[in-house]
Amino acid sequence: MVIEFEYGKIIATQHEVVIRLEGEHRATMQAAADAVQLMGKGANVVVVNCSEAKWSIKLDNETQLRQLSQILGCSIH
């Protein structure tokens, strides 16, 4: 599934998340689904913290976070 947000696109499957940022540098971040944590309560942040990578990105709204939660099958903290 593809979720569009202000800074680019989130491409998510049950197994991984890829975030492609638009703009001059066109950064791409990728993580296995089991390394992803979703922070809600107004924060709306995707956090990846594992031995291979550490990054986070703020989404536009809670709806995007809920969609990602459903795709990955993980809860929002």
Image (cartoon, grey):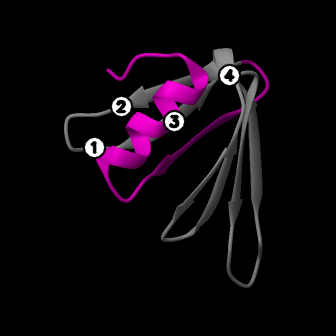
Q: Amino acid at mark 1?
A: Ala
Q: Which label sits in the foreground, 3 or 2? A: 3
Image quarter where the N terminus lies is top right
Mark 3 element type: helix
For label 4, count other residues whose C-alpha is less than 10 Å away and answer few (under 14), some (14-19) or many (20+).
some
**Which residue is at a point 77% across and 40% down the rendered structure image?**
30
- Closer to the chain start, of discs 2 and 4, is 4
Please check the rendered image and state whether residue 72 is part of the magenta-colored stretch, yes or no.
Answer: yes
Q: Amino acid at mark 3?
A: Leu
Q: Do the CB atoms of the residues marked 1 and 2 lie less than 8 Å apart?
A: yes
Q: Which label sits in the foreground, 3 or 1? A: 3
The residue singled out by tag 1 in the image is: 43
The residue singled out by tag 2 in the image is: 39
Q: Do the CB atoms of the residues marked 3 and 2 lie less than 8 Å apart?
A: no
3D distance between C-alphas at marks 2 and 4: 15 Å
Q: Amino acid at mark 4?
A: Ala
Q: Which label sits in the foreground, 1 or 4? A: 4
- Closer to the chain start, of discs 1 and 4, is 4
